[in-house]
Image: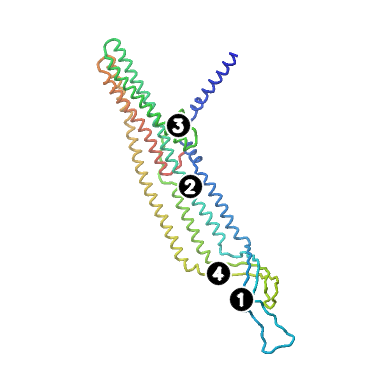
Amino acid sequence: MIKLIKILACQLIFWWLLPPARAQDQILTIEEAYKLARQNYPMIKQRDLIAASREFSVENAKKGYLPQFSIQGQATYQSEVTEFRLPVSIPGVEFPKISKDQYKLYGEANQVVYDGGNVKTHVKAQEASALVEEQKLEVELYKLNERVNQLFFGVLIADAQLEQSDMLKRDIQLGINKVEAQITNGTALKSNANILKAELLKAQQRDIELKTSRKAYLDMLSMLLNQQLGEAVTLVKPGFLKPETGIDRPELTLYTVQNQSLAVQEQLISVKNRPRLNLFFQGGFGRPALNILNNSFDPYYITGARLSWSLSGLYTAKNERKLIGNNRQAIQLQRETFLFNTSLSARQQNAELERFEQLLATDDEIIALRERIKAASAAQLENGIINSSDYLREVNAEDQSRQAKILHEIQLLVSAYNLQTTLGKPIE
């Protein structure tokens, strides 16, 4: 019994330790984050709806080539009908009389022979409209990259600051150990150790704030990616990206397909004003039928070709083309405005990129100088030449220089990836 309890206890401990081990193995790159954000964003489902709508609309438009059937009925009463009258009466001869109430029930089938390209152009219009909707969706999905950048690099900044905080706490603890040794030897006051301990507590408080901020970023990133990202997840710091030149955003493709859709609409104006030629067959039952002299219910049929040409559309065709021209100009203005604003943002982000590159060039030199100053201060503290406040000042100065470098490194990456996102170039 005791042996069984030990085995169960070991298994419980094993399973209790297993999830953290898996969490530590969880690794996420920014490229994977971009992909997961697109795959799990609720709006992505709209792509299937657009495809289905296009399929149904195109299929319906193509059915214009099929025979068109209709059934109609009519019952009328007229005040007068045709009568046969002769100036003289003929004995034994009676002319038929037509009833004033007449009835007709018939069906008609029409087969398109020539429609001026109406069905074909409507198919193109439906495809162009679906393409515009798909590209609008692509524009919305592309905006996810900006959100991923903010959250992903927010976590990286918190990770780097936590790592530097550990170095700061080690330096403070080193000072505490030296001061406590001096206190034991009676060469320093307890207040000197208390100053360092208070600073150590402040560093620990900053750790709490950084961890809270990191968890908030991870929670939002988890929701965006639809992935459970534990606190032990490792976000891979991406390498430096040299942004390409030129703008290649999905908005530009949207403007192109919108112009293509307008071109199809312009074709529809010409198509609807062309003549139509149909073959038709009409068969029915009525009183009278085709023979108006027969006042009984009889079947009948008519077949032939029908030519129709509606000219009323010519009145409005010119203005309709002008409206399309106005829409085309509006799209061009939107395109120029977008390019202007994007170029302006890219120029600003490029200036930030150059600024961080220049700052990083001197960060290492500053840190090296601060390290030497701190080492000298540590030796002076140990020999009682300076007090803990003087030592703490140099420790904080080195910490600030390292924090500045950490921030500059991440800001350089953020600027590079934001610039690449602004330009729209693919990130491999």
Q: Are marks 1 and 3 in contact (CB under 8 Å)?
A: no
Which residue is painted at 40% across and 28% down in the image?
211
Q: Nearer the viewer, mark 1 or mark 2?
A: 1
What amino acid type is highlighted by mark number 4? Trp
Query: CA separation, marks 4 and 1?
Result: 31 Å
Instruction: Identify the element where label 4 is drawn.
Output: loop
On the image, numbered disc 3 is attached to which residue? 236
* The residue positioned farthest toward the bottom in the image shown: 88
Q: Earlier in the sequence, mark 3 or mark 2?
A: 2
Q: Earlier in the sequence, mark 1 or mark 3?
A: 1
Task: Say above or below: 216 vs 51.
Answer: above
Q: Earlier in the sequence, mark 1 or mark 2?
A: 1
On the image, numbered disc 4 is attached to which residue? 309
Please give the label number shown on residue 137. 2
Residue 278 x/y as whole percent: 61, 67
What amino acid type is highlighted by mark number 3? Val
On the image, numbered disc 1 is attached to which residue? 78
Q: Earlier in the sequence, mark 4 or mark 2?
A: 2
Q: Nearer the viewer, mark 4 or mark 1?
A: 1
Which residue is painted at 49% across and 52% down in the image?
132
